[in-house]
Image (spheres, rainbow, N blue to C red):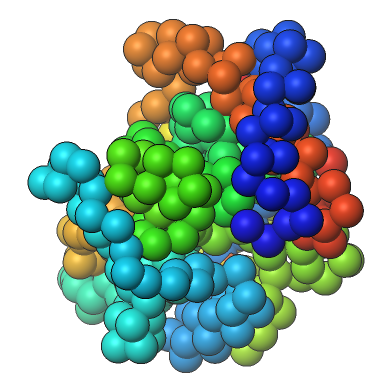
Amino acid sequence: MSTNLSRRSFIKAGLITAGAVAAAGVPRPPSARAADAELCTLLDLQQCIACGACVEACREVNDTKFPAPIGPMPDMIPRNRVKIADWSAAERRSIDDRLTPYNWLFIQPAVGEYNGEDFEINIPRRCMHCRNAPCSNLCPFGAAFTQDNGIVRIHPDVCMGGAKCKAVCPWHIPERQSGVGLHLDLLPQYAGNGVMYKCDRCYDRIKAGERPACIDVCPEDVQQIGPRQEILEKAHQLAREMDGYIYGETENGGTNTIYVSPVPFDVLNQAIEKGPGSPHLAPAPDAMASANNMALAMAIAPVAGVAGAVARFMSLGKSDGGGKETQHER
Ligand code: SF4
Ligand code: SF4
Ligand code: SF4
């Protein structure tokens, strides 16, 4: 655990703060977050030349956040239900054509024909940073959370690796690395099995007044970042100019990642390779609109609120930045 606190202190802190946080854990609607405070990205898919500079930059700046397992990894019980996910060996760690715990961004090629013309579109893929993120709302430990600026993160010191976030994400974005995390000290054979990883929108660079690394290095200015409303206006303007299409504005109830493409997204979705680590581009209904998920979010709010508060407590004095954080914001 990369903090001065010991595991015992972690649990103790959780118990001490439990009472206070139970009240704070009451779910809040996403509208409680000021829309103009949310950071949103616009990706002009006409421009991407698949040079890979953004993928490389993401790996470089996040190298210190990547998991560092120290083997051997404990066998999980039941063994056939919770599998070990190990991406740490050099060969797997270097994979950059899908999402992994060591690769939070990849370029997904889409090649095909539309309106009688060939197309080749390259799509930078990573977490969409959803406005009402089910990963954040439904993490039973409060490890996934949404900052007031809309960035959705997973706290590596709190995540148990149970992969609920991945199961409820419409794009199944977070990826697990075994052999790291809190579960090794608490219930090494029975809980979670690792930590989940995904794009954190370079929250620390943003806090320092810098742009995310993938945006900074792009030679074609594929991405822009700014207040959500401003980005949406630009996206619609761009879509009008190219007679194009938008993805991300309404998907999963609205995301803070807006793609604009001259080819419709249902056509792109047909053209891309989909599967583990390679998310789809299909319509994505609002996961938090489901009665089951809303009820679940209400039910786990106090528990997750406690863990989330402990995570905040643990972060005190750490230079991980990120601005004001709202644990388990709904
Ligand atoms: S894309 Fe998935 S992992 Fe990212 S914020 Fe949305 S639900 Fe969470
Ligand atoms: S915002 Fe940062 S963490 Fe996310 S894909 Fe870009 S470089 Fe990687
Ligand atoms: S750096 Fe820019 S042009 Fe190169 S792959 Fe990334 S988004 Fe595309």
**Going 45% across and 22% down the picture, which residue do you hit?**
288
**Percent of width and height locating residue 208:** 87, 66
Q: Is residue 133 above or below residue 163?
A: above
44 or 295: nearer the viewer: 295
Q: Is residue 330 above or below residue 196?
A: above
Identify the image quadrant of residue 189: top left
Q: Is residue 215 above or below residue 269?
A: below
- For the N terminus, give its image quadrant: bottom right
223 or 59: nearer the viewer: 59
Count of marks, rendered view: 0
- Name the side, left or right, on which 299 lies relative to 256: left
Residue furthest left in the image? 80
- Name the side, left or right, on which 66 lies relative to 72: right
Identify the image quadrant of residue 263: bottom left
Determine if residue 39 is in view: no
**Going 49% across and 10% down the picture, which residue do you hit?**
299
**Percent of width and height locating residue 21:** 73, 17
- For the C terminus, give its image quadrant: top right
**Percent of width and height locating residue 113:** 19, 71
**Going 35% across and 12% down the picture, which residue do you hit?**
292
- Name the side, left or right, on which 194 lies relative to 224: left
Q: Is residue 286 above or below residue 79?
A: above
**Percent of width and height locating residue 287:** 40, 27
315 or 230: nearer the viewer: 315
291 or 66: nearer the viewer: 66
Determine if residue 76 is in view: yes
